[in-house]
Each structure stands twice: as C-alpha cells, then as structure tokens.
Amino acid sequence: MEKEKCRQVKGIELVASENYVCRAVLDALGSHLTNKYSEGMPGARYYGGNQYIDQIERLCWERALAAFNLDPESWGVNVQPYSCTSANFAVYTGLLLPSDRIMGLDSPSGGHVSHGFYTPSGKKISGASIFFESLSYKVNPHTGYIDYEKLEERAMDFHPKILICGGSSYPREWDYARFRQIADKCGAVLMCDMAHISGLVAAKECSSPFEYCDIVTSTTHKSLRGPRGGIIFFRKGKKMRKHGFSVCQTDESEQYDFEDRINFAVFPSLQGGPHNNHIAALAIALKQVATSEYKAYIQQVKKNAQALASALMRRKCRLVTGGTDNHLILWDLRTFGLTGKSFEKVCEACHISLNKTPIFGENGAICPGGVRIGTPAMTTRGCLEGDFETIAEFLLRAAHIASTLQKEHGKYQKEFLKGLQHSRDIAELRNHVETFSSQFAMPGSDLGLFNEL
Ligand code: DSN
C-alpha cells in the first residue's frame, strides 16, 4: 500500500477515468459503516439496526439530485450500484427480457463494453452482450465524430429497446436532442451513461443528458471525484412526451414505471447489501460537487485539456477529431510509427500513467494506434495550463524515446521491453517527471509516511 501511494504521488496521472479523493471521502470509506448489512431500501431493510444508515442513504439521494439540479418529483436515484457496469446491467435487467435488444457506441469507437460488445470474431464480451442482443453504432472513421445518419439508419433497422449514449473515449459533445429524436422514432428508452463526464454535467460545463434522457447512469469516482461506485437516475412521475426534439409532460395520467423495476434489479436481482461506507463517502463528495470551488475545478479540467491538446497539436501531433470539448484527448500515435501499447509501456517506465486506445483508420479498420489522456486527476493536484505544456513536452519526449527504442530493438514486445529497462533516456525522463509531480500535493496523502521509499 505504501509503494502504491508513493507511485500515485510521484507520478503524473493521466488516465482519463481516474482522480484523487479528499481525506473526508477516504475517512468515510475506511469507517465503521462497512460493518453494517442494509439489504433493501431506506425504511424497508431486511435487518434491524439501520436507522442511521437509512438517514445516510436518504441524504445521499438528496445530494445526488441537488448536484444535478433535479426535481425529486420527476427524478429518482439509486446510489447502491457497486460500479457503473453494475448500474448499466441493473437497468437492462429491470427493463428488458433476456435477448431483448440494446444499442450503444461500439467499443473501438469509444463506447464501453457494458453497452454491449462483440469482438470482430463474434465473441460476447460483457453480460450486456451475453444476455441481450446488441448492435452498436460507430464514429465516422474520417472525422472521429459519431455518425448520426448511420446511427439512425441502424436503429430503424434494429429497433433496440434501449438506445444508449455516452462512452469512455469520446472527446466531443453528445447531441442528446438527436438521440432523443432517434429513440422516439424507433420506440426506444433513451439511456445515457455519463460516467466520464458526470462532473462536467454537474458543473454545467457540457450539455446535460437529463434534458432528453429517460435514464442516466454514472460512476462516482471519475470527474465526479467521489468514491468508486455507480449510480442510476431515472425519470418518475407523469410521463413526458416528445415535443419537437425536446420532452414535456403529457396530459395523460400515464406514469413512468422505472423506479420499482430498477430498484428491484439492483437488489435483490443483482447485488447483495449496499456498501454503506461508499454511500456515505458519495454523500460527502456530492456535497462538494454543489460548490463554486468544484465548478472552478471542472472549468480548469477543461482548460487543461484544451492546453494539452493545443500543445500537442502545435508539435504536429495528430489528435482524433482535432481536439476536445471535454476532459480527454485521443492521440493517434501512428504518425510516430508507434502502437498505443508500446507508448503506454514507455510512459509507465517514466512514471506517467495513461492507457492505450484503439483508433479508427480512415478505411474503417481499427488499430491499437493511440492513447487516451485525461486531465481530471492532475487538475485535482493543482496543475494549470502551463503545467500541461510541460506535460506535453514530457509526452513528446516519451514518444521520441519509444520510436528510438523501436528502431533499436524492433517492434516485438519482448525485445522492446528489454531495451526499455536499460534506457538512460527513460531514467532521465523519469527523474524530470518525479521532480515535476512532487511539487503538487496529493489530496488525502500523508507525505511523511513514505518519504524514504
Ligand atoms: N474503466 C473505465 C474507463 O477507463 O473509462 C470505464 O469503466
């Protein structure tokens, strides 16, 4: 544990889905709340002694709705999912029958496997594709943007029962109005998995899926900066009906039926007792999300992503879609003759964490030629635009080192990794990275504990 803490402090964390939580969140996670069983919902538990746990979970509901400015008459929330993958699967389980159809963004296009994914050879990867039928939509290989025309065409042929927007590696805004229009046309429930951008949504720094979607899921630990876990928001009360591209309340008395179905799917269908320590930690994080400091943090996350994007593009690097609207960029490394995997390994040796990602070729072929880079974690540590200029320099240096290593040792991983271990350039860059990173405090850490490591 001490070694991992040391790695987190001394390195540059650029995995787009990671962040650093504050001491209060860590304290709640490590608290006595982990001792209690609370299967069921507040006021309806399977065990006695839950009077205070009920208060905590209800407070978490209130703060979750307030963080996203949602009216408790029209939206409900379930804060028990252990992760967003569990949250997504609970939605499918509650609303669908086995083999019903779902449609989400293809994983190589930036979607998440929990939205249904088959490998090109037809292998079913996640429960979403094992228990349900899925057909994905894709980005346009020339532009990197979602191809809404093709999406509509596929949706009208496939008639999914749930249409999913949101993804893990998409650097641009989502056109929720367009998704609503397509969902209405093909008769689908519209669900958004906003896991990556939930912090931006809460801070009103991107368009909101709540305006158009029926159900919204998220993780709680990415840009939202809470503990690891999942959350599900669902419409309740009187049904909305389409009005132009938007939605408004119907005159009819038809009610949404998501609440009981989703709550039952989370427990008892899929999960056991909720992790009360996580729910308390989430309530703490959600209180912070509603502050002006958090809004300023998210604005900085975006400014830093822009700064990193322009610093790399000024250095002739190719970014998918030519930039970003949010907290992440996708860097196409094929111009350096590199794969995402080799570059990720060099960065890891230099104490920079990021992750490889597939890149759509202009011919539609998918190759593992890129990396995804996000700014939420280093922004939490206090990095500003100038610091991301420095980070761009480090990244470019790492790309040049990787190219040289590849020339000297070839593309085969075994030889490449051997060369990497003995590289003086890597040792030098790692020193620079550690000196840079050590200037920025890590929230919740106690530096004194591992200085000697
Ligand atoms: N693993 C997450 C990500 O990195 O985007 C998705 O669950």
Image (cartoon, rainbow, N blue to C red):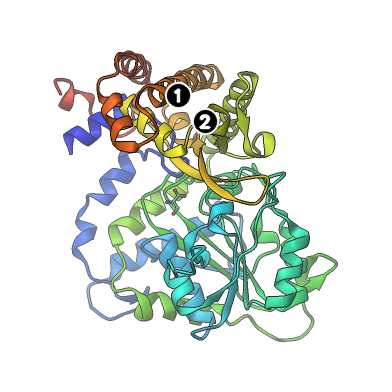
Q: Nearer the viewer, residue 435 or 364?
A: 364
Q: Residue at horizontal 29%, vertical 44%?
A: 26
Q: Would you say residue 43 is visible in this rendering?
A: no
User: Pointer 2: residues within 10 angstroms few (<14), some, or many (20+)?
Assistant: few
Against 10, residue 170 (above or below) is below
| Mark 1 lies on residue | 403
Mark linked to residue 337: 2
Residue 64 percent coordinates (x, y): 50, 57
What amino acid is labelled 1 in the image? Ser
Q: Residue furthest left?
A: 452
Residue plotted at (17% across, 34% down) = 2
Give the image location of residue 3, x and y in percent. 19, 33
Q: Are marks 2 and 1 in contact (CB under 8 Å)?
A: yes
Q: Of 388 and 341, which appears nearest the observer?
A: 341
| CA distance for labels 2 and 1 | 7 Å
Query: In the depicted view, which residue is nearer to us: 243 or 249?
Result: 243
Name the residue located 63 percent from the left edge and 38 percent from the top edge: 320
